Amino acid sequence: MDISTINTTQVNQNNNFIAADLVDVNAVNVTKQDATAPCAKEFLDAKFPLANGSHKNACSYVVYYQQLLVFMADGSQTGLKMPKQFVALNGHKSEPTAILLKDNGVHVELTFDRTKDNRDQELANINDIRLEGHEYWISLIDIERTVVASSMQEQVFTAKDGSDYLLKR
């Protein structure tokens, strides 16, 4: 099943599935063959815009002090237009394995895989972009990665202030 098959009416009727005010699922038409997931990055640009540029041109995401810093393909760097949307990370600040963003009470997790040399396909080595639903984590890269939240353990991230950030799944 492709995420584009879910229409806005279904989402509005079943608010337990995903937060409809966060994502217009019709705008997220992602296929498994599309390794760079441009529609997922359009989603990031719409809900977590950068101060300058687009997530499509991001090469690396790092945490600098308590801010998300994004390095771009042209050598420039930027941050989020609304810095408070960055809430936590996993891994080291200079090479996080995951970044946790939050908008309207809903989390979005970007996971990275720096072990693969996929610079031609994905500049920032994004492995997945997952949207928190009521009972599911929906992959915007590969719908088959969608996970029932109750089958997942609670996960501890590091909040931007250095404290533990418990994400109940």
Image (cartoon, rainbow, N blue to C red):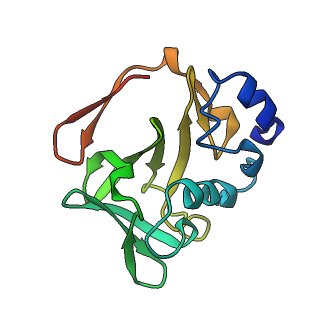
Name the residue rendered at 48%, 40% in the picture.
104
The answer to whether residue 105 shows anywhere in this view is yes
Q: Name the residue at the top extreme.
A: 150
Q: Position of residue 38 (x, y in %)?
A: 67, 61
Q: Quadrant of the N terminus?
A: top right
Q: Which residue occupies the foreground of this view, 159 or 147? A: 159
14 shown above or below 79: above
Q: Which residue occupies the foreground of this view, 162 or 49? A: 49
Q: Is residue 12 left or right of residue 74?
A: right
Name the residue rendered at 68%, 33% in the picture.
144
Q: Which residue occupies the foreground of this view, 75 or 17? A: 17
The answer to whether residue 1 shows anywhere in this view is no
27 shown above or below 80: above
Residue 34: quadrant of the picture: bottom right
Q: Position of residue 112 (x, y in %)?
A: 45, 51
Name the residue rendered at 37%, 77% in the picture.
77
76 shown above or below 71: below
Residue 135: quadrant of the picture: top right
Q: Position of residue 147 (x, y in %)?
A: 58, 26
Q: Quadrant of the C terminus?
A: top left
Q: Is residue 44 left or right of residue 76?
A: right
126 shown above or below 13: below
Name the residue rendered at 58%, 42% in the picture.
22
Q: In this figure, what is the number of numbered marks?
A: 0
Q: Is residue 149 left or right of residue 17?
A: left
Q: Position of residue 109 (x, y in %)?
A: 46, 43
